[in-house]
Amino acid sequence: MDSQYKGRVALDTLGCKLNQAETEKLARQLAEVGYQLVPPTDGADVYILNTCTVTHIADRKARRRLRLAHRRNPNALVVATGCYAQRAPQELASIEGVSLVIGNSEKRHLPRLVAESSHITKSVLAQDSHCRTRCLIKVQDGCHSPCAYCIVPLVRGEEESLSSDQIVAEVRKRTGDGSKEVVLTGTKIGSYHYNGVNLPGLLEKLLSETIVARVRLSSLQPQEISPQLIALWQDRRLCRHFHLPLQSGSDGVLKRMRRHYTTADYRRAVATIRALVPDVAITTDVIVGFPGETDEEFEESYELCRQMDLARIHVFPYSPRPGTEAANMPSQVGDRVKQERNQKMLALAKESITNFSQKFLGKTMMVLWEKQSGNRVWSGLSDNYIKVYTRSNRDLSNRLLPVKLTKVGDDGVWGEVMAKTISGTS
């Protein structure tokens, strides 16, 4: 492919880890054909936003960012892609400054479409592109069992899994580039299936055929948890972190949502994981204010979340999405009630982070350091999803080091890197 310099391109992402994985892949493709990757704030020649449309808030953020990109550089090629672009292309195309709208179905052609739409000629070399410390790898896309509230199946299409050999090759390439951790992501990765290889088979293949230091899964459904799957976590390269969406702790609401499990199923999944994986972090998503949710049903959700001793709770007020069953359900919950329930659940979420983190004070954990902020402060993640901070004059970037956890902070835990390891290799 022609790698002559084509200009400065900024990539921006909203939404899920699948979107992030696709953006990372796009960044590599654009760098290979001659684009210089720059931050969105730099007023690039090309600005590409990978959109999300799960909530009306995500839509609003997308519109705001597209307008801001146009203001930063009125001459830039502004491109909207992703789920919002798939759902409502004309809506995005009507925004001043947006030059190109590319839905998910055409996203794979984006580098060519961008190159054909921009005519930038400059005689300097493009900078290299690097995958970030934790590299996201797409393994699956689509969903054929839509929940009543979810627009993702409408914008992502039918389920499709990537070849296990292709995934292994991608992981080898990323580890060869220096990445210490890969995150396997997709719309519904628990349904992964390609030529007889399911998710446990894919994990076994990755563990046996690559040297990746850590593998993390983005999300699983409660009904996808089995002893066969969880037994693989005897290999410590698999991160002790399971994101297990609950959405509601009320069986009545779960039924209206068309979720494929009950609260009893959720409890059993959590118990199975904890019986086989010590010190595991279980995180979740919860929707408050789903149509028809009564005060009693909300309290059931709140109580179940409290009992589950979760590491993190991501809280979302219900947002009606056009074209979904739930958008037309009667008994829509008012905004004031949703906000009250949202605040109460968020308070529990904050308490849950603190309670989980405190269990590990005084212990030594392996932390993968990712980035440095001001004042010599570095941040990274333990394998069980604890955000860890430390102060150091050393370059800790992309190093996997033992850290003694000492103090719980506002958004994580402070720790001390073991002195005898900081100067060595990792």
Image (cartoon, rainbow, N blue to C red):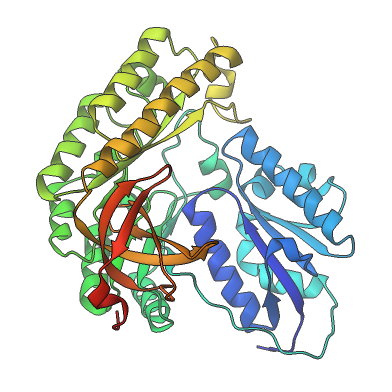
User: Is 208 located above or below residue 1 in the figure?
Assistant: above
Q: Is residue 116 left or right of residue 391?
A: right
Residue 200 image-quadrant placement: bottom left
Instruction: Identify which residue, 171 or 338, lies in the foreground.
Output: 338
Along the line of sight, the residue nearer the viewer: 248 or 372: 372
| Residue 8 appears in view | yes
Image coords of residue 366 (percent x, y): 26, 64
Toward which corner of the image does residue 348 lie, by quadrant? Answer: top left
Residue that appears at 70% across and 66% down: 10
Classify residue 254 as left or right of residue 404: right
Which quadrant is home to the N terminus?
bottom right
Left-right relation of 244 to 162? left
Instruction: Kindly identify the residue that appears in the image at 22 percent across and 44 percent down.
Output: 225
Q: Which residue sits at x=70%, y=79%?
A: 35
Q: Is residue 158 left or right of residue 298?
A: right
- Indicate whether 415 appears above or below 220: below
Question: The C terminus is located in which quarter?
Answer: bottom left
- On the image, the x and y values in percent for residue 141 come to 46, 55
**Quadrant of the rendered structure where residue 110 is?**
bottom right
For this orientation, the residue located farthest to the left is 275
Q: How many marks?
A: 0
Please determine whether, in this image, residue 86 is positioned above or below residue 108.
Answer: above
Relative to the observer, which residue lies in front, 355 or 105? 355
Let me know if residue 135 appears in the view: no
Q: Position of residue 13 (x, y in %)?
A: 61, 55
Q: Position of residue 49 (x, y in %)?
A: 68, 56
Q: Viewer-proximal residue, 191 or 18?
A: 18
